[in-house]
Image (spheres, grey):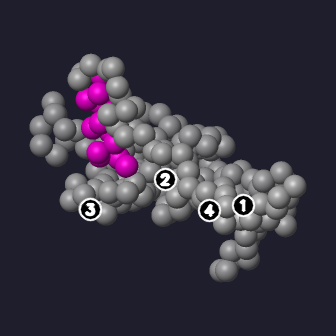
């Protein structure tokens, strides 16, 4: 049997599987069905974040999601696009801080300042964010959150009118 040399095996350039173009992805769809995904791709894709003059540097996001990966992920997208994101964590910190692959504590990272062991998922999803501790399970904590959160009205109340947030959960955009 003949020996096969590595030079005899064709090597495909990366990526080995060709990437589909938008025309190939949306083939057969009407123009109306293509409109939103094309707009979304043009405006939200990470590769163009720094090039956009309309980046979100004038928006503040208050992230009250706890143990919810989708909330942390969504607010991290705002942070990547230049918004100021403030995480509201319960006393003791967000449980995501302690998540590690397969529960392996040796895979945690150590904070250079506090020495706290932190999971990679927390570091990934909570990058570019500020953090504050507030106990939303107490009436005092919920009242403090209501006092902190003010949402400017864009219409109806006249220029400069504001309203305070009624509920203390979810994600709220602030200008």
- Residue 140 rendering spot, x and y as whole percentages: 57, 45
Q: In whole angstroms, how far apart are the C-alphas of marks 2 and 4?
A: 11 Å
- Residue 52 rendering spot, x and y as whole percentages: 25, 58
Identified at 62% across, 62% down, the residue is: 123
Q: Are marks 2 and 1 in contact (CB under 8 Å)?
A: no
Left or right: 47 in relation to 8? left
| Mark count | 4
- Residue 170 rendering spot, x and y as whole percentages: 50, 37
Left or right: 169 in relation to 91? left
Residue 173 visible in the current orientation: yes
- Provide the residue designation for mark 3: 51
Q: Are marks 1 and 3 in contact (CB under 8 Å)?
A: no
Q: Kindly indicate the quadrant of the structure image that contains residue 153.
A: top left
Main SS of residues in magenta: helix
- Provide the residue designation for mark 2: 76
Residue 147 visible in the current orientation: no
Q: Are marks 4 and 1 in contact (CB under 8 Å)?
A: yes
Are there few (<14), some (14-19), or many (20+) residues within 10 Å of tag 3? few
Report helix, strand or loop for mark 4.
helix
Given this view, does label 4 or label 3 mark the residue nearer the observer? 3
Report helix, strand or loop for mark 2.
helix
Q: In whole angstroms, how far apart are the C-alphas of marks 3 and 2?
A: 18 Å
Which range is magenta? 33-45
Q: Residue furthest bottom?
A: 113
Identified at 72% across, 60% down, the residue is: 119
Per the rendering, the mark at residue 123 is 4
Asked if 61 appears above or below 28 in the picture, the reply is below
Report helix, strand or loop for mark 1.
loop
- Provide the residue designation for mark 1: 119
């Amino acid at each position: 049997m003949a020996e096969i040399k590595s030079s005899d095996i064709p090597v495909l350039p990366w990526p080995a599987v060709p990437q589909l173009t938008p025309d190939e992805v949306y083939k057969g769809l009407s123009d109306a069905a293509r409109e939103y995904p094309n707009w979304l791709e043009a405006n939200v894709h990470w590769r163009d974040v720094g090039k956009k003059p309309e980046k979100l540097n004038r928006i503040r996001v208050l992230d009250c999601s706890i143990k919810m990966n989708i909330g942390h992920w969504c607010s991290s997208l705002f942070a990547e696009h230049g918004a100021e994101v403030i995480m509201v964590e319960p006393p003791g910190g967000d449980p995501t801080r302690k998540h590690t692959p397969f529960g392996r504590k040796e895979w945690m990272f150590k904070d250079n300042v506090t020495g706290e062991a932190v999971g990679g998922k927390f570091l990934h999803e909570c990058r570019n964010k500020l953090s504050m501790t507030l106990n939303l399970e107490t009436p005092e904590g919920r009242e403090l959150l209501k006092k902190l959160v003010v949402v400017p009205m864009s219409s109806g109340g006249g220029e400069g009118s504001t309203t305070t947030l009624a509920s203390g959960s979810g994600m709220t955009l602030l200008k």
